[in-house]
Image (cartoon, coloured by chain):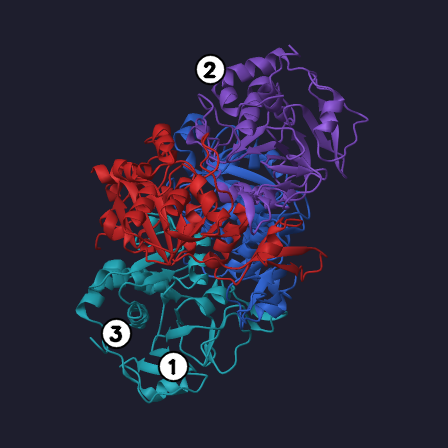
Chain colours: A cyan, B blue, C red, D purple
C-alpha cells in the first residue's frame, strides 16, 4: 500500500488527519482538497465533529463530492444554513477550531502568500487572493494548508507578499506533512516513497526534522472513504499531482 | 402599491458608467450574471466591482473592458477551472486597479456603511501586508485591554445587484440555501436591484415572511430572468453548466460573442 | 450525535450565582420565562441581566431578589401595564445596579463580542448623557471625515437563554416571526441555552434549513416547555395571558408564590 | 366636532399627520399612540408609505390593534420580517424617514428624558429608559414624540437627564402640536377647545407661537379610521387622557 500511496490520496488523507473529535472544522471556496478531507473524516473516523462549509452547510450529507467546493450540494441534508457573515464572525471570535486555507507560497513561519508572484504592484502572476486568510489565519484556533507541488518556489524562504500571518498549524504537500512548533514549521512526517533528503532539497526554507518519521500509511477505512468520494478518479485526474 | 418589476434592460439601466457595483453570490453560484452580461451589451465602462469572491462575473466584465477597479477578497473561476484569465490579465497589465481585501475586511467595510459608522473594526489582519497596502488604520483599544484592532473605512456601493430564487411583484426577495454576502450588500448600497428566477404570489411570502432576505422597500427595481445565474448555479433550480464555462474560456474572439448570444436572457 | 435535550431543572443549572445572563425575546413576547422562574425556584442570586427590552422577566427576578445588575435599554411591562414595579423599586432603593443603554448600544456591545473586536462603533449617541454615564469612548475617524463616533466595549454574557418555537433533538432551534435580538445574543454568549415549545423531527429542519436561527453546535443544552413563554406570548402558538400578568402585579406576598405555582412548567 | 375632539383622538390624529407619502415610518415598543397613528394613516390617507414596527412587520395588515405595541399580531400579513438589528441599522445609516420615540420629559430644544425623575444615581422615579432613542433620535431623518399630559413637568425648561438629543421634529400633547424649526420647538397648532394662553401657561419652556393656529379638526376619514381601530374605546379608556 505504501509505495503506491498516490500523492492525491496523501494530501487528502493527511489533511483529514488534522480533524479532531468534537471540534468545529471549516472548508472554504477553491478548496477541493479540504472539502474531500472533511468528508473523508466524517466517513472514516469514529468520532463526532462539526463540519461547516462555505456553501452554508452544517454537517451536511452530500450525495456526492462536487467539483466546486462551494457548490450548494454541500448543504444537502443540513439542518441549518450558516452563511458567510456567520462563519467569519465565528472564526473572528475564536469559535473556529480548525480552518483550512489555501496558499500559493508558504514560508518557514507558516505565513502565506496567495496574492501575487513578483511585486504586488507589478505582478508577474496575479493570484486569486487570500479570501478570508488575513482574518482567519490569525483568529482560528488552528489552520492548515496544502500545496499541490512540493518545491522551493512553493515552500519558500521569503514570501513575495505576506497575504496572511498567524496561527498556521499544519501544511501538507504531496510528499510531506509539516506541523508548527510555535516558532516555525517542523517536519512531522514524509511520504514513505521519498527520502528525507529529497524533502530537504525540495523545501525552500530550513526546518527541523528531528522528530520526523515516514508518514503512517492510509488505513483501509481511510482508503475506502476516499474511493467512495472519488469513485471514478475525477478529482485525482483533475488535480494531476506528482510525488 | 406599484409594481417594481421591469425588464432586464430597464433594470440594468440603473447602473451608469463609473458606478461602483456590488454583485451577489459567490464564484459560480447564484450570481446576477444576466445583469453582468447586459452591462456588457449596454457598453458600460469604468465600473468598480465589489464582491468578496467574484469569478466569472468579473472575468467577463474585464474581458469586455467594462471594469476600472476591483475590490475583492478572492478571485477565481472555481469549479475545476482555476484562475479567472481575463481578470488576471487586466490586473497584470494594469488595465484594472485592484483593492485587495480579505473577504471579511470587505464585509467590514460594507458593515460600516450598513451601520452608519465611519469605520468598522475587524479581527485578525495582524501581520498581513494588506493593511499597509490599503492604508488601513490600526486603533488602540480605548478600554485598556492593551490590544489594537484594524478598522476598515465604509464601502458604500452605488448599486447592489443580487440574483434570487423568488420575488414578489412589489420587490420582496428570497433565496434558498446560503445568502452568501447578499444581505450586507443590500443593506449597504444606495440602490438595490434584484433579478429573480420567478415571481410568486405575495401570499407565498406572507405564509413564511421569515424567509424574505430583502423587503420590498429596500428594492429599487426587480426583474425576472429564468436561468439568469447561468452558466453558474441557482440551487435548487439548476447547477453549474460546466460545458458553457469551458466554451466561455476558449481564448478566441468569437467565444465571447457566442457566449453572450447563448445566454438564457438572449434566448427568450 | 448525542441529544442536547435535558430537563428544565438541568438546563437551568447551567446558570450559576453571579452569572451574566442574556435573555431573549422582548417585553412580554417570546421570553425564556420558564427558565426565569426556575432560576427563582433554584434560589439563584447576584445575576446580571442583559436584555435590550426586559420587562416581566427582570421584574420577577428583582422581586425574588435574584438580581445584582441590569444592562438594559428600556424596561417596562408593556401591554397596558406600564412600568415594571419591582424592578423600579430595586433601582430606586439601590438594591440593583443599572447600566442604562440605548437598545442599539447594547447590541453594539454584543456585536463586539460576536465579531471578536475590542469595541464596536455605534451611530448616534451624540448629546446623550448615557455616554458620560457609561464612560464610553468617542473616537475620531482616522480616515479624515472629521467626524467622531462613540464606541461600545464588548458585552459577553456568560449565558444566553432564548425561547423558540421548535428545536431538534440535536439542539437546532428556530423561531417564527421576529427574532428580536436572539441572533446576536446566541453569537456573543459563552453558553447558549434553548427552551422550545416542541421538539420536531430533524427532517422538518432539513426541509427548510434557512429558517434555523441557531445551529446545533452553538447550543449547549435545550429543553421543551410547552407554554414556557407564559404569561407572555409565543406566536403563533399563544398570545399574552393578560389576566395572569394582572394577577402577578398584585402587590401582596402570596401573589408571587401563586404565580410561580400556576406557571405551565409547574403544572406538567 | 371640534369641541368634542377627545384628547386621545387629538394625539393619535396629529401623530398620524406627520406621516408623509412614500416614506419609511417606524413605531416601537411601549408605543400604542404611534402604532395607532401609523395604522390610522394607512387607513385614512390616500398615499403609500412603508410602515415598519418593532414586532418585525413591514406594511402589516393586523386584524385588530393589539394592546401591546410590540405584539406579533403586528406582523399579520407582512411579506417579510424586519427584525430589531435590521431596523436599527436602517435608522443608523439614515434610511429611516420618520421614527416615533417616547419621552417622559421634553425640553424646548426637543431633547428628551426617559431615564429618571430626579438625580440619575438616586432617582425619585426610575423611568423605563430610552429604548433606542439615543441612537435613533440623532440618526432618523425626523422623529416625533408625544406626551399624554401637557404640563410644566412634562414639557420642561431643563431635563432631569438628557437621554437623547437630536432630530426631534414634532411633539404632540392632548392640547398642542409643536414642530421644530431647526433651533427650538415652536408651537404649530393648539387644540381648538383650549386657548393659546393655556398652552403657554402649561408649558415649561418658552416657545414661539407666531405662526400657530388652532389645529384643523379631524376629517371624517380620520375619525372613522380611529373608530375602526378602537371600536370599543378600550385604548381611549386605558389612556385616560384629559385636555
Which one is in front in this view, the residue at disc 1 or the one at disc 3? 1
**1 and 3 marks on the same chain:** yes
Q: Mark 2 sits on what residue?
A: D232
| Residue A27 located left or right of residue B5 | left
The answer to whether residue B257 shows anywhere in this view is no
For the residues labelled 1 and 3, the Cα–Cα distance comes to 27 Å
Q: From the image, tell me which residue sits under label 1.
A: A181
Q: Are marks 2 and 1 on the same chain?
A: no
The residue that appears at 62% across and 56% down in the rendered structure is: C132
Residue found farthest to the right: D210
Query: Which residue position is annotated with label 3?
Result: A5
Residue at coordinates 26% horizontally, 41% vertically from top-left? C225
Q: Secondary structure at mark 2?
A: loop
Viewport quadrant of the N terminus of chain A: bottom left
Using the rendered view, name the quadrant where residue D192 is placed.
top right
Residue at mark 2 to residue at mark 1: CA–CA distance: 76 Å
Q: Secondary structure at mark 3?
A: loop
Rendering coords of residue C188 (x, y %):
43, 55
Percent across and percent down for residue C214 are 36, 49
Query: Label 2: how many residues lie within 10 Å, few (<14), some (14-19) or many (20+)?
Result: few
Judged left or right of residue D63, residue C33 is: left
Amino acid at each position: 500500500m505504501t509505495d503506491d500511496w498516490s500523492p492525491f490520496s496523501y494530501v487528502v488523507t493527511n489533511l483529514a488527519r488534522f480533524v479532531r473529535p468534537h471540534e468545529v472544522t471549516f472548508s472554504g471556496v477553491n478548496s477541493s482538497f479540504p472539502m474531500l478531507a472533511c468528508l473523508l473524516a466524517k466517513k472514516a473516523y469514529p468520532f463526532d465533529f462539526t463540519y461547516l462549509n462555505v456553501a452554508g452547510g452544517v454537517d451536511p450529507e452530500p450525495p456526492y463530492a462536487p467539483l466546486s467546493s462551494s457548490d450548494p450540494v454541500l448543504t444537502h441534508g443540513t439542518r441549518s444554513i450558516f452563511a458567510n457573515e456567520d462563519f467569519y464572525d465565528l472564526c473572528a471570535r475564536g469559535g473556529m477550531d480548525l480552518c483550512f486555507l489555501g496558499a500559493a507560497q508558504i514560508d518557514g513561519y507558516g505565513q502565506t502568500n496567495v496574492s501575487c508572484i513578483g511585486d504586488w504592484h507589478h505582478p508577474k502572476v496575479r493570484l486569486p487572493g487570500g479570501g478570508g486568510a488575513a482574518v482567519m489565519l490569525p483568529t482560528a484556533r488552528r489552520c492548515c494548508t496544502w500545496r499541490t507541488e512540493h518545491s522551493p518556489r512553493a515552500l519558500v524562504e521569503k514570501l513575495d507578499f505576506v497575504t496572511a500571518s498567524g496561527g498556521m498549524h499544519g501544511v501538507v504537500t504531496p510528499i510531506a506533512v509539516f506541523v508548527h512548533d510555535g516558532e516555525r514549521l517542523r517536519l512531522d512526517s514524509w511520504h514513505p516513497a521519498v527520502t528525507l533528503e529529497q524533502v530537504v532539497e525540495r523545501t525552500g526554507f530550513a526546518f527541523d526534522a528531528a522528530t520526523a518519521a515516514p508518514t503512517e500509511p492510509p488505513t483501509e477505512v481511510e482508503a475506502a472513504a476516499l474511493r467512495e468520494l472519488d469513485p471514478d478518479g475525477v478529482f485525482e485526474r483533475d488535480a494531476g499531482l506528482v510525488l | 402599491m406599484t409594481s417594481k418589476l421591469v425588464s432586464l434592460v430597464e433594470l440594468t439601466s440603473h447602473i451608469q458608467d463609473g458606478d461602483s457595483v456590488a454583485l451577489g453570490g459567490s464564484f459560480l453560484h447564484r450570481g446576477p450574471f444576466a445583469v453582468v452580461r447586459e452591462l456588457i451589451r449596454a457598453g458600460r465602462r469604468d465600473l468598480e466591482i465589489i464582491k468578496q469572491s467574484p469569478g466569472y462575473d468579473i472575468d467577463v466584465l474585464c474581458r469586455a473592458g467594462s471594469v476600472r477597479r476591483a475590490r475583492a477578497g478572492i478571485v477565481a473561476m472555481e469549479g475545476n477551472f482555476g484562475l479567472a484569465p481575463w481578470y488576471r490579465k487586466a490586473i497584470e497589465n494594469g488595465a484594472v486597479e485592484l483593492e485587495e481585501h480579505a473577504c471579511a475586511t470587505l464585509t467590514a467595510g460594507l458593515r460600516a456603511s450598513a451601520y452608519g459608522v465611519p469605520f468598522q473594526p475587524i479581527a485578525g489582519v495582524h501581520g498581513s501586508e494588506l493593511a499597509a497596502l490599503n492604508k488601513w488604520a490600526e486603533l488602540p483599544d480605548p478600554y485598556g485591554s492593551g490590544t489594537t484592532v484594524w478598522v476598515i473605512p465604509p464601502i458604500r456601493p452605488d448599486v447592489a445587484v443580487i440574483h434570487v430564487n423568488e420575488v414578489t411583484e412589489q420587490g420582496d426577495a428570497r433565496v434558498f440555501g446560503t445568502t452568501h454576502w447578499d444581505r450586507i450588500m443590500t443593506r449597504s448600497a444606495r440602490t438595490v436591484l434584484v433579478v429573480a428566477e420567478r415571481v410568486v404570489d405575495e401570499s407565498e411570502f406572507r405564509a413564511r415572511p421569515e424567509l424574505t432576505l430583502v423587503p420590498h422597500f429596500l428594492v429599487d427595481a426587480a426583474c425576472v430572468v429564468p436561468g439568469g445565474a447561468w452558466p453558474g448555479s441557482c440551487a435548487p433550480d439548476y447547477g453549474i453548466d460546466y460545458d458553457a464555462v469551458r466554451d466561455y474560456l476558449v481564448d478566441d474572439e468569437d467565444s465571447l460573442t457566442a457566449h453572450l448570444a447563448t445566454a438564457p436572457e438572449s434566448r427568450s
